[in-house]
Image (cartoon, rainbow, N blue to C red):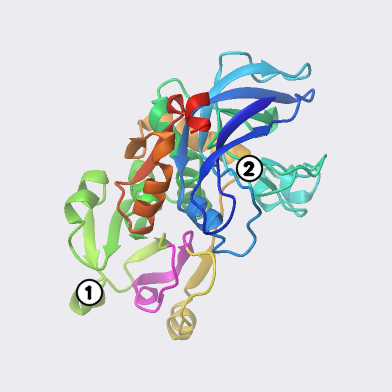
Amino acid sequence: MKTYGFAATSCDAPLAPFSFERRDLRDNDIAMDILYCGVCHSDLHQARNDWGWSQYPMVPGHEIVGRVTATGKAVTRYKVGDAVAVGCMVDSCQTCDQCRKGEEQLCREGNTQTYNDKDRITGERTYGGYSKHLVVREEFALKVPEKLDLSRAAPLLCAGITTYSPLRTWNVGPGSRVGVIGLGGLGHMAVKLASGMGADVTVLSRSNAKEKDALALGADRLLVSTDDTAMAKAASGFDLIIDTVPVKHDLNPYMPLLDVDGTLVLVGQVGPLNEPSTVPLIMGRRRIAGSPIGGIAQTQEMLDFCGRKNILPDCEMIRMDQINAAFDRLERSDVHYRFVIDMATLTPDTAAA
């Protein structure tokens, strides 16, 4: 299938129009027209090769919403016209213990990423959602609940599941005391989801500038992490802290906030951190953990939960040809809270510009 999109051709080049081929449908594949694609901070990291494993040309995008246009002959879950979504992965071995448990994101052989990876069968490059069309095996497509606004649902496929998964892993519910460090794309979803689960939610921020926003998103309060007195009063006050900060930072101020057996879960920074002290860990039986996305079943559970609770990210819609300006703004944290590309603005003329 001939298609087109925007691609990075090197770590220092702006994204530019790019034409390429999607694979022919296999028996268990669906084809979809992409309607909306979220812009994730990891798209920026990948395009700039911040993590050191980028391959070019690269078509980013792993927060994808669209409609089915064709199905392989063995497809049973979807039909033409269905609203579907695709997140961060498009395949896995399907046979290891983790895949059999529905934890495809932890596949022992490594899951196949939606972009900047290799197809498990052909070895061809995977290209993401900054494009007009997608072909994906039906097992890695998700049903979008009818109640969800398609134009705002795309960031749920990464920001949503990245924060939902640790909330479920650590059994958050009514009475849970949850802290959220950072109020960006991930943080604002953590607040909405934890609040929707009935938790008592506190946003931790370096100033009180975002207090009004935090409360509007569903938080019960904002704790200023640079206020030593307030931090001391909050000691042992949290069962779980979701750390969404996407850069190297210091965990030491936050560890005393955890109660006995409490956990701080990293979901933002991929890479080094400042050296943590083990004193609060040992003396309070506290933990530092990490969490990626969830598996396909849990991602569907998250979408269904958001459909029931009417939980959606706060988005700013952009045109495809505004992606480089959006990347620049994302680097400055100048977004409230997630960019979404309207793929109706990606036309053959745009792709040829």
| Amino acid type of the residue tagged 2 in the rendering | Thr
Give the vertical position of 187 relative to 261 (above or below). above
Q: Position of residue 321 (x, y in %)?
A: 42, 37
| Amino acid type of the residue tagged 1 in the rendering | Lys
Residue picked out by circle 1:
233
Cα separation, mark 2 vs mark 1, equals: 44 Å
Q: Position of residue 161 (x, y in %)?
A: 50, 45
Q: Quadrant of residue 22?
A: top right
Residue picked out by circle 2:
114
Q: Position of residue 314 (x, y in %)?
A: 32, 40
Question: Does the magenta segment cover residue 254?
Answer: yes
Q: Which mark is residue 293?
A: none
Q: Secondary structure at mark 1?
A: helix
Residue 173: tell me if it is visible. no
The residue drawn where x is 53% and y is 31% is: 352
Q: Is residue 74 left or right of residue 6?
A: right
Q: Position of residue 49 (x, y in %)?
A: 57, 61
Q: Start and end of the magenta stretch?
A: 246-268
Total number of numbered discs in the rendering: 2
